[in-house]
Amino acid sequence: MLDGGLVRHHQHRRDTSVNPDERQDAERVLEDLRSLCRAAQAYAEQHLTDATLSGFLEQAAGLHAHEIAAGEPDRRITVSTIHRSKGTEARLVVLLGCEERLLPSWRALASPDREQLAEERRLFYVACTRAKDQLILTHAAARGGRPTGGPSRFLSEAGLIDPSQALAA
């Protein structure tokens, strides 16, 4: 890592890389770091005298969530990535953005390493199998006014849509 820490390292990657994907990735990391700093600042302002690092991390991880009393229906909503869904289950799972260039990601599609695409396929199937009762999969024709890559190839591979609706692999 460069002298100056994590922020300086990613600023250097963003500003000097010849690879546009690497520059874009560095900018995403910098935005994540800015978001983390904003969240820590908000926590510190809410807990003026009793703010601690462990308290912030517990809040960020959702450990201060409302406890469900015995017999009370569980109406909590958990937002997660497909990467973190392994080992969890829910009565209803909604998997958003099942589109080419999102799932599978543009990185996996552009990679010469076909294992990256296979790993994203496994993640898709793991996420789908987290649903106990109901699974809802979505894809959009456009995002932000721009057309998407169309339905994910994983939807047709799983027999969920007609193969002619998905892009060829």
Image: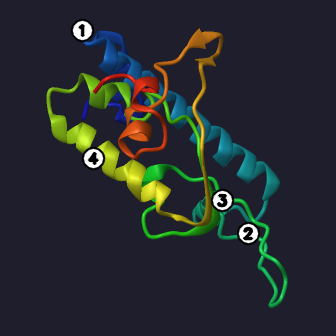
Tag nearer the camera, 4 or 1: 4
Residue count near mark 4 (Cα–Cα under 10 Å), binned few <14, some 14–19, many ≥20: few
Residue 126, position as x, y percentages in the image = 41, 58
Label 1 crowd (10 A; few <14 / some 14-19 / many >=20): few
Q: Residue at x 59, y 20 (%)?
A: 141
* Residue 15 to residue 8: above or below: above
Helix, strand or loop at mark 4? helix
Residue nearest the observer in this picture, 165 or 146: 165
- Whole-percent x, y for residue 37 in the image: 60, 40
Image quarter where the C terminus lies is top left
Task: Check if mark 4's residue and mark 3's residue have beta carbons within 8 Å.
Answer: no
Location of the N terminus (image quadrant): top left
| Mark sitting earlier along the chain (4/1) | 1
Residue matched to label 3: 78
Give the left or right position of residue 64, taking residue 9 as reference.
right
Mark number for residue 119?
4
Amino acid marked by disc 1: Val
Label 3, residues with CA under 10 Å away: few <14, some 14-19, many ≥20: few
Mark 2 residue type: Ala
Rendered location of residue 165, percent (x, y): 46, 25
- Closest to the camera, between mark 4 and mark 3, is 4
Nearest-to-viewer mark from 3 and 2: 3
Please report the residue visible at 58 percent of the width from the left and 10 percent of the height from the top. Answer: 146
Query: From the viewer's perspective, is the residue at label 1 or at label 3 nearer?
Result: 3
Give SS at disc 3.
Answer: loop
Instruction: Work out whether residue 8 or residue 85 is closer to the camera in this orientation and state it.
Output: 85
Q: Is the C-beta separation of discs 4 and 1 under 8 Å? A: no
Please name the residue that numbered disc 2 is placed on.
65
What residue is pinned by disc 1?
Answer: 18
| In the image: residue 146, left or right of residue 6 | right
